[in-house]
Image (cartoon, rainbow, N blue to C red):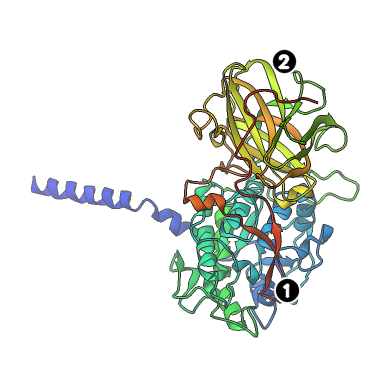
Amino acid sequence: MKSNLKLLTLMLAVCLTAAAGQPAPARQADDPNPPEQVVRLVFIHHSTGENWLADGYGDLGRTLGENNYFVSDTNYGWGPNAVGDRTDIPDWMEWFHSGDTPVYMEALFRESGQNSSYTRSLSDPGGENQIIMFKSCFPNSDLEGNPNDPPGSYADMTVSGAKYVYNQILAYFASRPDKLFIVITSPPLSDATHAANARAFTGWLVNDWLRENNYQLNNVAVFDFYNVLTGPEAHHRFRDGRFEHTVGSRNTLYYPSDDDHPSMQGSLKATEEFVPLLNVFYHRWQADAPSQIQPEPASPGENAPQPELYPAQPQAAGLVDDFESDNPAGTNGWEPFWDEATPTSMHCAAEAEMALAGERALILDFDVSPGAWATCALFYESPQNWSSAEGMTFSYRTAQTDLTFNLDIYAGSRDAQETYYYTIEAPPESADGWIPISIRWSDFHRADWEENAGAPFARSDQVVGLAFGFETYADAPNTGTLWVDELSLLGAQPAVAPAPLVGGTEPAGDAGDAQRQPTFRRLLPCGSAVAFPLGLVCVAGLMRRRLRGGKASQA
């Protein structure tokens, strides 16, 4: 009996030990050894990256070659539209989240040249680059705002604006599981003014970015170049079969050269810690990457397949209006309304001046007097049941860089109409190309002047209309042009990265957060750590009053 009890106890202990060790196989499977085959890699960078790659300085290019990576890189002047000139954090929107993304990515995937000085001993294996590394330079560690700021709703050089950028570009990465994207965090500055912000942001990238977006693929990884350069005791590496991310005692650059470019010592330390990590990232990605990773490049004259620009977005459950016909079924078409007590003017119609798809798009020309409002609305003859969808999706572009507008949803009945709205602050990129946006029902909130102000929208089965609206402060006009196309219902299936692609309701915070007006700053090249403001991107807190129910005046 005692023998059986001892045996049972031993078996139970073995089972418990096995159960407690369930995560261990994943760690044991991590492989820091080089790939067995030569893998093509391209690195987007400027001068800090150039130093890091260079033989006799950071030795990254040569070391990557020794680990079976065929390395190419971009630099100033590279690519279509010289996009290589632009590697600040807000510029990643142009690279990975704009109408030019397919053009840039085709050139990037096929790039095989050297734009820095490093030894390449491997032969080009052919095909496309499979790994895309990208890094902003040290001025991008000069982020304004506060360390704990949540993601914002447009791109700028603040903590919230930087988080916004990385949330947006994640959609493109999700659309290309056949590529491995490696984010290299910006190196630190010697100036401690905003060092706490930089530390918080890089920590968010490493620890929270993918988790907050519920990102399930293994084709995105982060190397904390920033942290590695803050001190000898600061590490981001793979050692003894596990990841080690150790934060040191300082947030500023420990390894300066004559300026804020990292020294040879710091660059060599980064190479030593990064390359084994890259090997682990590569093997993790390969474990669930598509079987056909590398199609052969198309010969001249062939129609090479192009990736869909934003397939990671939830797909539309139904088209509301593509603006190719005058009136959607069951409506009188889009109608302009404005505050008739002011000199405000509003024009909206489906015209052929500019379109994303087809021949026409909705154009909205508005000149809203201070303190007034204007809308372009579509009303249905009978309530629409859109409860099978998750929200609205469309694309837009603007004639200027500081435009703010609302998307309104009207629910209930025409006699007892409820108004819900969502404010959109157009990023600077909207003046250069079309911007896709997806807004979930939960992001719409009840208008301030109605009962239950601020309540989330829950009447998607009783939609009577929708509108694009414009308002102003009491002492400032709002004038501009907006184009809208491909207005659809957001599909019911969530995307791989379910966070709203543009915008998103920020968590409740201090009252002062709503009044904060961060600025967008184009950074100087890496040769200078000085940044300068270009002016306000958009006006925070604009649009607090909306169309008060009825038709005020009509063109």
Q: Report the residue that reaches farthest toward the front.
A: 341
Q: Amino acid at mark 2?
A: Gly
Q: Report the residue that reaches farthest toward the right.
A: 301
> Residue tagged by mark 1?
121
Left or right side of 90 for 514: left
Q: Report the residue that reaches farthest toward the left.
A: 1
> Residue tagged by mark 2?
330
**In terms of image quadrants, where is residue 532?**
bottom right
Q: Residues within 10 Å of mark 1 (few under 14, many from 20)?
A: few
Q: How many marks?
A: 2
- Give me the residue at 65% from left, 70% from top: 139
Q: Amino acid at mark 1?
A: Ser
Q: Position of residue 538 (x, y in %)?
A: 67, 50
Q: Position of residue 23 (x, y in %)?
A: 39, 52
Instruction: Give the position of the C terminus as an image quadrant.
Output: top right
In the displayed structure, 14 sits above or below 321; it is: below
Left or right side of 498 for 124: right
* Front in this rendered view, residue 520 or 107: 520
* Front in this rendered view, residue 411 or 45: 411
Instruction: Give the position of the N terminus as an image quadrant.
Output: top left
Q: Which mark is residue 166?
A: none
In the displayed structure, 204 sits above or below 315; it is: below
Q: Position of residue 475 (x, y in %)?
A: 68, 47
Decide: marks 2, 1 in contact (CB < 8 A)? no
Q: Residues within 10 Å of mark 2 (few under 14, many from 20)?
A: few
Left or right side of 66 for 237: left
